[in-house]
Each structure stands twice: as C-alpha cells, then as structure tokens.
Amino acid sequence: MLIARPFTSAAIKLHPFDCGEPELNEWLARYAGQSEKKDNVRTTLLLDEEAQRVAGYFSMRTFELSAADGESALGRRRRYPAPAMLLARLAVDKDYQGGGVGKLLLVDALQRLLAAADNIGFEIIVVHALHEDAACFYLKHGFRRFLDHQLSLFLTTNDLRATFASTGPH
Ligand SMILES: CC(C)(COP(=O)(O)OP(=O)(O)OC[C@H]1O[C@@H](n2cnc3c(N)ncnc32)[C@H](O)[C@@H]1OP(=O)(O)O)[C@@H](O)C(=O)NCCC(=O)NCCS
C-alpha cells in the first residue's frame, strides 16, 4: 500500500531512490533533509509500506513570479510580481513509473495547494520541467506553458479550484 508521509531522513535511507534523473535522486538523498530543517522546501514522500521504500516524492515552496513572467503566463500586463507556489520537484522511482503513481503525487500536491489557498494568497502554481517529456506530463494534467519559456508551466489558482470543483470534493 502506498501512503503519503512527511519527509523523514530515516525513510529515504530504507532503499536507494532512482527515478532515472540523477539531479532529482541526489537532491532527495543529499539536500531534502537540510531544506526541510530550514523550512525552505517541504517534501512529501509516497512510501510503499510493504516494500519499505520510497515510491515517489514531491517538494513545494513559495515563489514569486516577476511582473514580466507573470505577464508571459497570464497574458495580461502586470505592474507587480505575482505571489506563487512552486512545485519544485516531483519524481517517481523507475520501479513504479507508468502505474499511476506520478498522477497520484500530482493530485496530492494540488490538493494540498488547494487547501493552502484558503489561508494563503497566491495566484499561480509554477513548475519548471527538467525536459520536454516531463513538460508533457504536466500539460496532460492541465498545466499550460509560459509563452516564452517552453519548460516552465503554470496553473492558476482559479484553474486549480475549477479542476477540483469539476472532479469532486477536495
Ligand atoms: C514524469 C513522471 C513523474 C511520471 O510519473 P508516472 O508514474 O510514470 O506517470 P503515471 O503513470 O502516473 O501517468 C499518469 C498519466 O500521465 C501520462 N504520462 C506519464 N508520463 C508522461 C509523459 N512523459 N508525457 C505525457 N504523458 C505522460 C500517463 O500516460 C498517464 O495518463 P493516463 O492517466 O491517461 O493513463 C515520472 O516518469 C518520473 O518521475 N520521471 C523522472 C523524473 C522526472 O522527469 N520528473 C519530472 C521533473 S520536472
């Protein structure tokens, strides 16, 4: 059974995590713990309780979109930066890819952002995809590309509410 849990250093030591992207593997192994302690990034692990290993993870933090990037995403002139949230990383171990785990993680992350939006103001959720393949995964799940950054994608908080309003309660 897969279960979402807050990051712990003990959980990531159970079994090496390998999503096929060295940068994302190394970040989890070496930096997620420090970032967690500093309240810099919050990481959620999806644990396979039977196999005692991490099936996937995502990490999120606050973000500020410059007025120019906000204009590129939202398509209207902006004088001020836009408060945002960053889906900083999302990865699934190779042994679990293609089985719906990525979608499970993304829906979990978006539900947490939806809940946060009741108490914290932010206009937009941003993700910087590592490559076009990852960008396609986000496009498939409702994200849109920035006009002038092909690998940066976004979902407005309004889009987020509409998505969950049409797919059921959060
Ligand atoms: C990208 C990644 C997170 C997808 O996770 P996954 O568990 O393999 O994906 P899922 O099985 O949950 O797929 C969910 C849906 O997205 C689709 N999908 C998955 N990868 C996709 C891709 N690269 N492009 C387009 N669609 C994709 C699936 O076909 C599936 O569609 P369906 O719901 O219609 O069946 C995973 O492959 C991964 O961790 N890759 C390496 C790390 C990485 O690139 N992370 C993104 C960093 S920005």
Image (tube, rainbow, N blue to C red):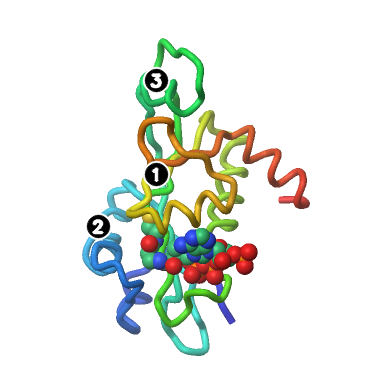
Is residue 3 depicted above or below 143 in this figure? below
> Tag 1 or tag 3, which sits nearer the N-term?
1
> Tag 2 or tag 1, which sits nearer the N-term?
2
| Residue 55 visible to an observer of this rendering | yes
Q: In the rendered structure, which amino acid carries the disc numbered 2?
A: Gln
Which structural element holds mark 1? strand
User: How busy is the neighbourhood of tag 3: few (under 14 within 10 Å), some, or many (20 plus)?
Assistant: some
Q: Residue at x 78, y 52 (%)?
A: 168
Residue behind label 1 places its C-beta within 8 angstroms of ligand 1: no
**Residue that mark 1 sits on:** 61
Question: Which mark is nearer the camera, 1 or 2?
Answer: 1
**Residue that mark 3 sits on:** 81
Measure the alpha-carbon separation of dots 3 and 1: 16 Å
In this rendered view, identify the residue nearer to me: 7 or 100. 100
**Residue that mark 2 sits on:** 34
> Tag 2 or tag 3, which sits nearer the N-term?
2
Q: In the rendered structure, which amino acid carries the disc numbered 3?
A: Pro
Question: Which mark is nearer the camera, 3 or 1?
Answer: 3
Q: Residue at x 46, y 29 (%)?
A: 73
In this rendered view, identify the residue nearer to me: 77 or 13. 77
Q: Which residue is at the far top?
A: 79
Residue behind label 3 places its C-beta within 8 angstroms of ligand 1: no
| Residue 4 visible to an observer of this rendering | no
Which structural element holds mark 3? loop
Q: Residue at x 47, y 75 (%)?
A: 97
User: How busy is the neighbourhood of tag 2: few (under 14 within 10 Å), some, or many (20 plus)?
Assistant: few
